[in-house]
Image (tube, coloured by chain):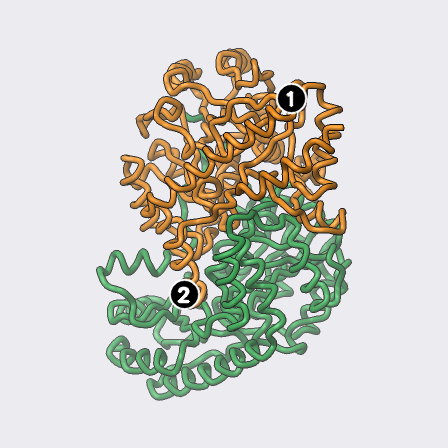
Chain colours: A green, B orange
Amino acid sequence: MVTYTELIKSLSAEVPFVGPETQERFLGSEFKVRLGANESIFGPSEMAINAMQKSANYDIWKYGDPENFELRNALALKMKVSDSNIVIGEGIDALLGYLVRLIVEPGTKVVTSLGAYPTFNYHVRGSGGELIFTPYKEDHEDLEALVAFATKHGAKLIYVANPDNPMGTAISAKRIQDTIRNIPEGCLLCLDEAYADFSKEDIIPIIDPENTRVLRLRTFSKAYGLAGARIGFAVGAKELIKSFDKIRNHFGVNRIAQIGALVSISDEEHLKKVQKAVDFGKELIGKITTENNLLAIKSFTNFVAIDCGRGGHYAKKVMDNLIKSGVFVRMPSVSPLNRCIRVTVGTEEDLNFFAEKLPEALK
Amino acid sequence: MVTYTELIKSLSAEVPFVGPETQERFLGSEFKVRLGANESIFGPSEMAINAMQKSANYDIWKYGDPENFELRNALALKMKVSDSNIVIGEGIDALLGYLVRLIVEPGTKVVTSLGAYPTFNYHVRGSGGELIFTPYKEDHEDLEALVAFATKHGAKLIYVANPDNPMGTAISAKRIQDTIRNIPEGCLLCLDEAYADFSKEDIIPIIDPENTRVLRLRTFSKAYGLAGARIGFAVGAKELIKSFDKIRNHFGVNRIAQIGALVSISDEEHLKKVQKAVDFGKELIGKITTENNLLAIKSFTNFVAIDCGRGGHYAKKVMDNLIKSGVFVRMPSVSPLNRCIRVTVGTEEDLNFFAEKLPEALK
């Protein structure tokens, strides 16, 4: 018999998200369109694809550089920080895991919004942390409540996603800045900016990287079309960044992902094309929504939360119907957010297929 | 100020291995031959390369299947176990990290050999575990001592690599089986079989997957030539395997790695070619060693520990000289193992370059 830690014994074998492949196996058929995981169907830059293909042929037999040196330096230039302000990880999910392990031990209080990113919560529970939830306020994360709860409960970590997932809403850069100033002493704001590349500077603040009250997270899984590569990064104070070296999997980042990410950030044309395609897709989703007498919540991401107008039970029905008809979508997990289904921007063809199936799903 | 956990405060920012790229940046020049990380310069299967290149083009925008369903099923067939006996991870390093978190909490005792795999020790320290070391015995891990220490100290975890790294030696399958029977109640043997594909059944035992005293680890980084892909797996009792779902990064494995690994195991011809090339390379290293009046320790892996004959100081000199002359090699970290340098099998050309530089390095 294996002797598990007390913490492990207390946890259930939990899966933050059921993957679409699992659902396909259950349904016995493949999805026609994949609009549920906020991936970028527009894919990565052609230049990045070429570089990754070359790497698959020539140097995949080598471990990747554990310092991620070239990528960190390129990102430092782009983010206007030092390379010592950047740590690369196996996607934001892995970085959240590492961050939580740095700060959270059994009993540590952590504040997040009710219905926000479940994988963050998964990691907090995995370190024995105690989650404190504040409700969304008009489909936005309630920054004032998050800070007030953190102060009241002596929390060590606050999670905010801006732009938000699953609602797609955003908070102004100025309000984020104000919030950072109000973070209580000894507490860190984990600012998940996975969707930053779909927003402008009115939403994405310029933050002093040496500010020890905030760590920001970015990814290549969304606008850069590299979800399958599993690569993301965190930007923060040197000392905090350095501390990741105490626990991270130093050789964890795939070599093809490193080169794919590096080349991706040099291809600004591709990024612009994706941003444009996402804007077009969001407009199209808006049109489809209106045609079906539903309400699209204004989105600052590559997905749209669609208010189905009749509560969580109904939205779940709609989602299940869409899934059965070959459209992979997801939905928020808690009330009142779960009156919505969440639809990722796809190609025009994908969205037309969704439009075709939606009326039947709403019945 | 960030509030770190007590454990994190007690740890230093440690790097289990300095990567060759870091050394290259320090030296200001690239290595001519890369014989230090036990990678497989023979690369992956052509079929796997083609599949990975296709994936880089067509579906890298999708997250990988978090259940790794197809790969687990293919491995289950190959290993003659159920798919529920297998968990896939981001290389053995990540799986070691997860395993340690399942079992080790501050104060948990863990037994390993002095000079064995440092990344395992890194993870144990990262969970607050207390490492107990037993010395190697004639360049082999001392199984009897490991079990005796585990029994005496009430250890919850024992680490054994068979075949061994860094010495390349092996213990017979029969002795491994005997050892498993003697593992004390409540303790798990972590059997690292990273180099299993270079050995036969006299070394690699057939183990009942439901035996709760042992978890075995395998990788695609060695014989399969996919070190840069970061993918490995663990085989063990269903209940232990399931418990990884409590803490693992469910979406952590790169999609290209999943497909590369899946196709690799179907290409037995390539594996045989690599095994042959490794045997040839080991013979060549043996010849080079003899020509230089050194002793090659018999290897069951894709590398050879070469006894330089004059203790750790001298071997370190030899390694440093080789590195300066463009040959990346490594060496064991502790006495008496550190009388050796460790040379990975390369191509004939690589090894000839090594042969050319060795006499000068020995001076």
The amino acid type found where label 1 is placed reads Asn
Crowding at label 2, few (<14), some or many (≥20) Cα neighbours within 10 Å?
many
Element under disc 1: loop
Question: Could you tell me which residue is drawn at 33 percent across and 83 percent down?
Answer: A352
Q: How many marks?
A: 2
Element under disc 2: loop
The image shows residue B280, relative to residue A179, as above or below, that is above
Of B335 and B90, which appears nearest the observer?
Answer: B335
Residue picked out by circle 2: B59
Asked whether residue B25 is in view, the answer is: yes
2 or 1: tag closer to the N-terminus: 2
**Image quarter hosting the N terminus of chain A:** top left
- Is B253 on the left-hand or right-hand side of A326? right
Of A166 and A96, which appears nearest the observer?
Answer: A96
Asked whether residue A334 is in view, the answer is: no
Residue picked out by circle 1: B293
Looking at the image, which residue sits at the far left?
Answer: A28
The disc placed on residue A345 is none
